[in-house]
């Protein structure tokens, strides 16, 4: 059975076949050629397809005559974001560009006929970056980026021989473009990224990440262009050539740009350029051409110099790799890779409630804490009955990759949730999971093939979990074979040998360990285990867990899924790395454990009962954070609020609760403390960070009181939620965040929708939570209209909905103009307004 | 220098932070500097004069009154943009989730760093007598001019600085500007600022920019 989508016919097939034989030559610069003829900086060069079609045809024909096999349509910036306001529609300019390209090829064929030559020439649809940053660095959503690329491709797809997506700095943007091509047609995809002088792209993608991502998602040719000259680009190209298995494309600039009197020129000669290209081809580059500043002379040089140069052989090994945008993680190469298990609501009431209550922030915090604790990969599972799992999963993956650098393991039994998350994932994910059931394999493997990723295969099938290692191996083998029939290489599979609980199925612990060894030996694929199950039902679970982990690592486990906040478990991995020889010279171990003090027997018993409880953290986990803004160690809660002792106040609050009730603590200690801080802030005795620090300190006290309320079914402070959001288009949310913290410190319950929030989402949240007050923030004049729209929609939804606005550009007059119900100049006023409504 | 400017952004005015707060501010500056990858792109164009209106040979409308004032007396014009990069934004967002007070300090440190990055870049250019950096959105110059300015600089391709649909710069810690070379207007002033009415800095008797020495 053949599931791979093959490019089987036509020019596209011939183009790919051609790459297999000898170096394929692309054209050189277009923009710089047009600038030499009068194009001004900042102008749309695509307009010249219409106004100066003859120039375009002439330049392209010159490239072909100089020896190029392929030319690119003059459509680099022809997308809905960059081309708006050009005076032409995308359709007319892209079609005109293709027509110009075809005319140039006809001209070349005519020249060949006269000279008695015959060589096929190809036309590639040129796609450049959209000119906006995608989330999370920018505000452009993945879906919008996809739509923009799709629009270009739909216009041109039937009239070209392939698509070149080039000069892209962000693999996420590249992903949107590649999916747009794959879902529109079966044209060959040339995917070329651009790198900065730091050796990564401007968005921080390294060459290794770029290669594994592009190979995973199925680009036909991958490589590097623009930004640098061949000399500066050489280390990057050699790195790409040393890891890539697919054909590689290289298009350097003619050196670095030199600006003089408003004119741009480049500093590498035709001769030098040619010798670099020879070097790259000899090292294994399959497709070469020029980018900015190169001319037909450069291309002629490439053509002439490559006459006697065959493409160098590359036989790079396959590796099991997952990546985020900035982290590259190799599984199974001498280092144990730790997958953090904590983002999983199974058995964790707090997380389940957070998911049900739309407080994904709490899950994101779990992600940050696990990263700080040393995890390499994070499992993400939101499986709570009754939710829209695909939507929540997609949302959470986007939220986590906004603040965490680690690769993610997307974990769901719902193929739709897997697909939605894989689609918006920025990098090459782990996909958890498939198993030996035919139906599951048929649902999951196409997702793995389409988006690229490493899939985790569970050794169970229609008959359940086999009892013996040999039977589990057979299931693993079936998974690997079936995957390969979908075109998924075995290096993109890891096998979960399945842990059962020692208390119930004691004998099978050994079978699990034997399976690890067998899978390694017989199939040559990496192994994974979710370890914590083993101790279920036994006392002192951490002891069982760490002992089992050591045994499993010895049996060949590559990727344990564990709790990275359990320091003893993490230390077990460190110790294993020494004893197994992975950690040469014990360097890592000494670095991490040189300062360890061994607990006394009594301390150890404390560890046992304490287990691995929740913990809070500072940004760095290292800064002390606690200031003494008043001379002596403060004793009262009020003084602790004023001093901003946010790490100490929780304990003090618990103590105070033994003597006093929650309402008294709030009204006689916390609020007076906050009011004093507010006063000192107004007088210029305290400054913004200290105000916030005090607010956060109060919040920490409230957290203690809240748990007290819910356990005593007392009147709960601030049970009426307040909705806060920064409106669509606005990404500066510091003001809103300050308001949030200060309001929370006064005990209000806040639902924070974040920044750049579309009006529809705010209305939906209003519908769901029915808050008594909605606070909207906008920083720029350009986003006030979005605020106005939001208010209109909220008032349309419910005329009684009260909206408070604030932000740098707002005045009471503007607030009135856009029909806000309240204007708050600062956080203090926001609190006063909320008090008036809710108390 | 960076510390001074950071304190200015935190509206310290003439006050000084106590020792503990000072340490936190220093840590904020250190973390922000470590996470930043400052990049600057610039072009210098000779100014032409058509019927008394200054212009350059690029697609950039300079005919606004405030820009003409800025460029009066200048023979050339510097276009400049810089950013601290997307990695810093990640750190800032992450800190906002963990420790809002530190986030406020880091935000101020980042503002100080991007301003000083461009100041120092300008000082290192082989040109003299620069006016202050005039950014679109100031005075009678619409924010939409950002599109043209960043397009001429190819800021997206060269330094990864782009505009959103609502004309905000991303990464967020970025600056762009137009500068006269050989001009007379060295100091910025508040009078033309859109935020004149509501400015928090003015309320605290300070300004949002560093004064030239």
Image (spheres, coloured by chain):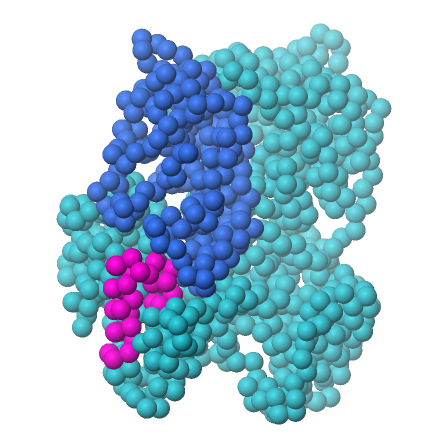
Chain colours: A cyan, B blue
- In the image: residue B95, left or right of residue A220: left
Q: Where does residue A231 sit, x and y in percent of width and height?
A: 72, 30
Q: Quadrant of residue A167?
A: top right
Is residue A586 or residue B206 the one in the foreground? B206
Q: Where does residue A135 sit, x and y in percent of width and height?
A: 46, 48
Residue B113, can we see it?
yes
The residue stretch that appears in magenta: A667-696
In this view, the residue farthest toward the right is: A308
Residue at 71% across, 81% down: A548
Residue at 37% across, 11% down: B49
Q: How many marks?
A: 0
Q: Quadrant of residue B140?
A: top left
- In the image: residue A796, left or right of residue A764: left
Residue at 50% across, 13% down: A38
Residue A805 lies in the magenta stretch: no
Vertical position of residue A632 compared to residue B77: above or below: below
Q: Where does residue A403 sit, x and y in percent of width and height?
A: 50, 57
- In the image: residue B34, left or right of residue A643: right
Dominant SS type (magenta): helix
Q: Quadrant of the C terminus of chain A?
A: bottom left
- In the image: residue A615, left or right of residue A268: left
Residue A673 lies in the magenta stretch: yes
Vertical position of residue A394 compared to residue A225: above or below: below
Q: Quadrant of residue A163?
A: top right
Q: Where does residue A585 sit, x and y in percent of width and height?
A: 81, 66
Residue A147, can we see it?
no
Residue at 63% across, 41% down: A198
Q: Quadrant of the N terminus of chain A?
A: bottom right
């Amino acid at each position: 059975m053949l599931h791979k989508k093959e490019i089987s016919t036509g020019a596209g097939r011939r183009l790919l076949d051609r790459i297999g034989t000898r170096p394929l030559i692309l054209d050189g610069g277009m923009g710089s050629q047009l600038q030499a003829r009068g194009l001004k900086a900042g102008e749309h060069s695509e307009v010249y397809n219409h106004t100066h079609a003859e120039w375009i045809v002439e330049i392209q024909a010159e490239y072909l005559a100089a020896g190029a096999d392929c030319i690119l349509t003059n459509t680099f910036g022809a997308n809905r974001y960059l081309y708006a306001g050009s005076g032409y529609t995308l359709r007319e300019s892209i079609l005109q560009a293709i027509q110009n390209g075809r005319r140039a090829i006809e001209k070349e064929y005519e020249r060949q006929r006269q000279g008695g030559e015959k060589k096929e020439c190809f036309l590639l649809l040129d796609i450049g970056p959209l000119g906006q940053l995608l989330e999370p660095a920018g505000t452009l959503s993945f879906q919008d980026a996809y739509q923009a690329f799709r629009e270009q491709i739909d216009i041109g797809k039937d009239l070209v021989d392939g698509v070149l997506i080039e000069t892209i700095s962000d693999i996420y943007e590249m992903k949107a473009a590649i999916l747009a091509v794959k879902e529109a047609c079966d044209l060959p995809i040339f995917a070329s990224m651009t790198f900065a002088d730091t050796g990564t792209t401007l968005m921080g993608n390294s060459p290794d990440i770029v290669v594994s991502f592009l190979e995973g998602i199925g680009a036909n040719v991958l490589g590097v262009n623009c930004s640098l000259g061949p000399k500066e680009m050489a280390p990057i190209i050699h790195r790409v050539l040393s890891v890539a298995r697919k054909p590689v494309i290289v298009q350097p600039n003619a050196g670095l740009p030199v600006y003089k009197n408003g004119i741009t020129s480049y500093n590498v000669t035709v001769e030098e350029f040619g010798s670099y290209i020879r070097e790259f081809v000899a090292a294994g580059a399959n497709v070469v051409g020029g980018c900015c500043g190169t001319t037909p002379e450069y291309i002629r040089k490439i053509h002439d110099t490559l006459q006697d140069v065959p493409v160098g052989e590359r036989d790079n090994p396959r590796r099991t790799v997952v990546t985020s945008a900035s982290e590259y993680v190799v599984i199974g190469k001498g280092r144990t890779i730790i997958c953090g298990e904590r983002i999983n609501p199974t058995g964790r009431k707090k997380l389940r409630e957070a998911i049900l209550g739309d407080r994904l922030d709490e899950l994101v915090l779990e992600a940050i804490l696990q990263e700080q604790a040393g995890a390499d990969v994070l499992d993400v599972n939101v499986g709570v009955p009754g939710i829209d799992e695909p939507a929540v999963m997609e949302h959470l993956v986007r939220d986590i990759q906004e603040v965490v650098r680690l690769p993610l393991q997307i974990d769901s039994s719902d193929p739709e949730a897997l697909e939605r998350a894989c689609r918006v994932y920025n990098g090459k994910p782990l996909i958890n999971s498939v198993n030996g059931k035919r139906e599951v394999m048929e649902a999951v493997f196409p997702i793995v093939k389409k988006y690229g990723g490493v899939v985790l295969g569970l050794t169970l099938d229609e008959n359940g979990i086999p009892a013996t290692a040999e039977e589990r191996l057979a299931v693993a083998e079936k998974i690997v074979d079936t995957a390969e029939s979908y075109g998924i290489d075995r290096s993109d599979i890891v096998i979960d040998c399945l842990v059962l609980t020692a208390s119930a199925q004691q004998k099978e612990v050994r079978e699990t360990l034997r399976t690890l060894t067998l899978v390694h030996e017989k199939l040559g694929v990496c192994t994974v285990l979710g370890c914590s199950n083993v101790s279920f039902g036994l006392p002192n679970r951490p002891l069982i867990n760490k002992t089992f982990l050591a045994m499993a690592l010895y049996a060949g486990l590559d990727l344990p899924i564990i709790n990275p906040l359990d320091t003893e478990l993490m230390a077990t991995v460190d110790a294993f790395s020494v004893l197994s020889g992975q950690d040469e010279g014990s360097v890592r171990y000494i670095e991490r454990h040189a300062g360890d003090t061994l607990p006394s027997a009594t301390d150890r018993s404390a560890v046992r009962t304490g287990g691995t409880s929740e913990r809070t953290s500072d940004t760095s986990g290292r800064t002390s954070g606690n200031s003494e803004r008043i001379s002596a160690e403060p004793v009262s809660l009020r003084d602790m609020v004023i001093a901003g002792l946010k790490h100490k106040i929780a304990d003090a609050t618990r103590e105070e609760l033994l003597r006093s009730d929650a309402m008294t603590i709030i009204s006689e200690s916390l609020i007076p403390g906050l009011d004093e801080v507010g006063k000192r802030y107004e007088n210029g005795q305290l400054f913004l960070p200290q105000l916030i620090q005090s607010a956060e300190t109060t919040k920490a006290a409230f957290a203690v009181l809240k748990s007290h309320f819910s356990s005593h079914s007392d009147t709960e402070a601030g049970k009426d939620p307040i909705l806060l959001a920064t409106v669509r288009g606005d990404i500066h949310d510091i003001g809103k965040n300050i308001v949030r913290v200060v309001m929370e410190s006064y005990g209000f319950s806040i639902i924070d929708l974040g920044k750049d929030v579309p009006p529809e989402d705010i209305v939906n949240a209003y519908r769901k939570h029915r808050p008594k007050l909605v606070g909207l923030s906008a920083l720029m004049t350009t986003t006030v209209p979005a605020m106005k729209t939001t208010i209109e929609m909220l008032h349309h939804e419910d005329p009684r909905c009260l909206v408070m606005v604030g932000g740098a550009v707002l005045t009471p007059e503007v607030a009135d103009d856009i029909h806000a119900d309240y204007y708050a100049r600062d956080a203090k006023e926001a609190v006063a307004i909320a008090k008036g409504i809710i108390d | 220098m960076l510390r001074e400017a950071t304190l200015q952004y935190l509206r310290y005015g003439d006050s000084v932070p106590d020792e503990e707060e000072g340490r936190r501010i220093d840590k904020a500056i250190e973390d922000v500097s470590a996470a930043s990858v400052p990049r600057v792109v610039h072009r210098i164009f000779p100014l032409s004069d058509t019927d008394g209106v200054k212009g350059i040979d690029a697609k950039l409308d300079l005919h606004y009154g405030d820009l003409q004032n800025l460029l009066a007396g200048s023979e050339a014009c510097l276009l400049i943009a810089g950013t601290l990069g997307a990695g810093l934004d990640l750190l800032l967002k992450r800190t906002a989730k963990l420790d809002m007070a530190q986030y406020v300090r880091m935000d101020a440190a980042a503002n100080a760093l991007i301003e000083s990055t461009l100041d120092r870049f300008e000082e290192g250019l082989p040109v003299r007598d620069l006016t202050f950096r005039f950014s679109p959105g100031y005075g009678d110059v619409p924010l939409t001019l950002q599109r043209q300015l960043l397009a001429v600089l190819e800021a997206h391709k060269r330094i990864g600085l782009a505009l959103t649909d609502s004309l905000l710069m991303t990464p967020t810690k970025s600056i762009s500007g137009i500068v006269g070379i050989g001009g007379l207007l060295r100091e910025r002033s508040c009078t033309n600022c859109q935020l004149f009415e509501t400015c928090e800095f003015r309320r605290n008797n300070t300004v949002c920019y560093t004064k030239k020495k």
